[in-house]
Amino acid sequence: MLEPQPAFSHEEQVAFLNRMLEAERAGANALRNILEEHPRHGEAWIALRRVHGDEAHNCVLLGKQIQRLGADYSHATGEFLDKLLSVQGRRARVELLVKGLRWAVKRFDEALPRLDGEVRDTIAGMRATHLHSIESCESVARMLAEDVN
């Protein structure tokens, strides 16, 4: 049986939040690029636009928590954006986005027991949003099953 991990120190909590902020920023920017590949207001575009809105909102939530902790937030963008831009094809990009969202959920799950109450509530909400985003992106990927571009 695994022993419970100790709570994050202030510095560890801020570092976690900044890492996730960089990842969320990469996801939001990746989605902006993905949206350009889809007809505006089409079914896939609408679903992906909602996911983009959630990613952008998560950046705000993370920034507020970092500021609440009296720290500076990172202005960097995570490496995921470059990975996504190197992938060809709309479906392949959406599938990579799903992998990125799953990566974030795993990081949330690992960190949740170690976070302070307010940060934990924020991350738990983001986790739920990510699970919904995964479902939406998987639905879009199915729509693009015959897509070869």
Image (cartoon, rainbow, N blue to C red):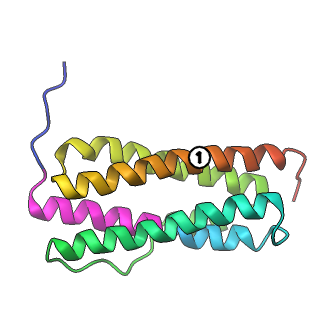
Viewer can see residue 133: yes
Image quadrant where one finds the C terminus: bottom right
Prevailing SS of the magenta stretch: helix
Q: Is residue 109 left or right of residue 104?
A: left
Q: Which span is picked out in magenta?
A: 8-24
> Quick one: 99 or 143, which is closer to the camera?
143
> Measured along the vertical axis of the image, is residue 107 above or below residue 81?
above
Q: Is residue 143 left or right of residue 67?
A: right
Q: Position of residue 111 (x, y in %)?
A: 26, 47
Q: Secondary structure at mark 1?
A: helix
Q: Residue at x 73, y 63 (%)?
A: 46
Query: How packed is label 1: few (under 14 Cα within 10 Å), some, or many (20 or more)?
Result: many
Image point 23% across, 58% down: which residue? 119
* Residue 116 picture location, percent across and down: 15, 53
Q: Quadrant of residue 86?
A: bottom right
Res 64 quadrant in image: bottom left
Q: At x 26% / y 59%, what residue is drawn?
A: 16
| Count of marks overlaid on the render | 1
Please say if 115 is above or below 49: above
Residue 87 seen from this side: no
6 left or right of 67 in image: left
Residue of label 1: 134
Where is residue 136 drawn, in percent x and y? Answer: 66, 49
- 67 relative to 24 in the view: left or right: left
